[in-house]
Image (cartoon, rainbow, N blue to C red):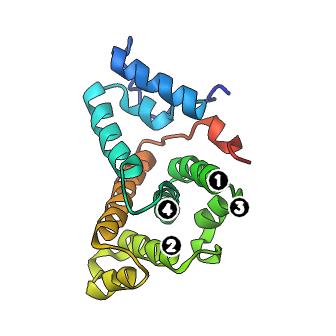
Amino acid sequence: MTDSRPPTALDLPMVDPLPEDTQKYFDICTEKLGLIPNVLKANAFDIDKLNAFSGIYNDLMLAKSGLSKLEREMIAVVVSSINRCFYCIVAHGAAVRQLSGDPMLGEMLAINYRVADLDPRQRAMLDFAAKMTTESYTIEEDDRQVLRDVGCSDRDIWDIANVAGFFNMTNRVASATAMWPNDGYHKQSR
């Protein structure tokens, strides 16, 4: 599916030609996802910025963690929903559908995660991410203890906080630049 509009409202074209390593990365995205995410295209006007963004994203979302890939994507959707980030709700909602095999879960998380049938650990994780998004200054030891009580390690808490923090940052950039989700995300895992 060809995207119907540019990745952002800014006139920042991708480097052309792309460096060999970047082109390989984009080819892998096309092979695995069927598209090159617009967030990558948007950052490709400056390869150092693209590499920095991709490095942080890949570490938080793909590296070894006590959180599953699905749980990290769930955090991304809930944070993005609170921030009303159209790009990330659509892109990460597609990932939730694909990873969970449940086409309704991504939509429940995007609209109101509290209606989803979540286990106590997932619910506590998303409650923490939501609180971090809306009122991080109020987080206290009791909030971290709730996570420990449902089986989260301190490393898991670190990962929850970092994934939520990353999406709070990227949501703001996406909204400020009118980043548009790839058309292909809308049909994935439906």
Q: Position of residue 31 (x, y in %)?
A: 56, 27
Task: Give SS at disc 2.
Answer: helix
Type of amino acid at the residue the image marks with label 3: Met
Q: Which residue is mark 2?
A: 122
Say which label, 3 or 1, has the lower sequence index. 1
Q: Quadrant of residue 89?
A: bottom right
Q: CA distance from mark 3 to mark 4?
A: 15 Å
- Up-down relation of residue 35 to residue 164 (above or below): above
Q: CA distance from mark 2 to mark 3?
A: 16 Å
State whether residue 4 appears in this view: yes
Q: Which residue is mark 3?
A: 104
Type of amino acid at the residue the image marks with label 4: Glu
Q: Are marks 4 and 2 in contact (CB under 8 Å)?
A: yes
The residue sitting at 65% across, 25% down in the picture is: 2
- Up-down relation of residue 108 to residue 27 (above or below): below
Q: CA distance from mark 1 to mark 2?
A: 16 Å
Bin the neighbour count of mark 2 within 10 Å (Cα to Cα): few under 14, some 14-19, many 20 and up. some
- Up-down relation of residue 172 to residue 182 (above or below): below
Can you tell which mark lies on residue 71? 4
Task: Give SS at disc 1.
Answer: helix
Q: Position of residue 72 (x, y in %)?
A: 46, 58
